[in-house]
Image (cartoon, rainbow, N blue to C red):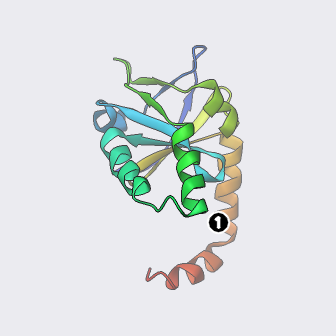
Amino acid sequence: MFLGEYSHTIDDKGRLTIPAKFRDELESGVVITRGLDGCLWAYSRSEWDALADKIGQLPTTNQAARNFSRFMFSSAFDSIPDRQGRILLPQKLRDYAGIQDETVIIGVKNKLEIWNPATWADVVANVEQGTEEIVAQLQDLGI
């Protein structure tokens, strides 16, 4: 399970060092793709395969399913961390998330989210200001 928040930099070759705590889980490979809310999502190979299977089972007759599949797969990038635990973040993905040289990496159970630090700070501020509303909405989901 991925947990926590970490600040890391992108080197001049576009590589991101994965937090040491997560390296064992990702050593066999990581898939990075566009996430929702303006971040990148990074999955272990096994989690990505499970997600890909679920997306593949969505009905192709449903336009939202087709669009979500396109969104997820068209930008996906497969990488294997090097000996220093670095992965390449392609420029196209960095542009999507507004990432230049600094990042915030957060663990979100089965995936990592990679954020532009300013965008992440805005998300945190909005969540902290709206906790009452969030709790009310989650009650309908059984939480």
Q: Say which amino acid is labelled 1.
A: Glu
* Residue for point 42% across, 48% down: 111
Describe residue 126's horizontal placement relative to residue 64 as left or right: right
Q: Position of residue 139 (x, y in %)?
A: 51, 84
Q: Position of residue 113 (x, y in %)?
A: 52, 45
Give SS at disc 1.
helix
The quadrant of the rendering that contains the C terminus is bottom left
Q: Is residue 109 above or below residue 16?
A: below
Describe residue 126's horizontal placement relative to residue 47 as left or right: right
* Residue for point 61% across, 45% down: 39
Choose top left, top right, bottom left or bottom right for residue 116.
top right
Determine crowd level at label 1: few under 14, some 14-19, many 20+ residues with C-alpha closer than 10 A: few
Q: Is residue 71 above or below residue 31?
A: below
Residue nearest the observer in this picture, 66 or 78 = 66
**Total numbered labels:** 1
Q: Is residue 46 above or below residue 124?
A: above
Q: Which residue is mark 1?
A: 128
Q: Position of residue 6 (x, y in %)?
A: 50, 40
Q: Position of residue 64 (x, y in %)?
A: 59, 61
Describe residue 15's horizontal placement relative to residue 132 as left or right: left
Choose top left, top right, bottom left or bottom right for residue 63.
bottom right
Describe residue 127's horizontal placement relative to residue 109 as left or right: right
* Residue for point 63% across, 25% down: 91
> Which residue is at the far top?
12
Residue nearest the observer in this picture, 86 or 58 = 58
Residue nearest the observer in this picture, 96 or 1 = 96
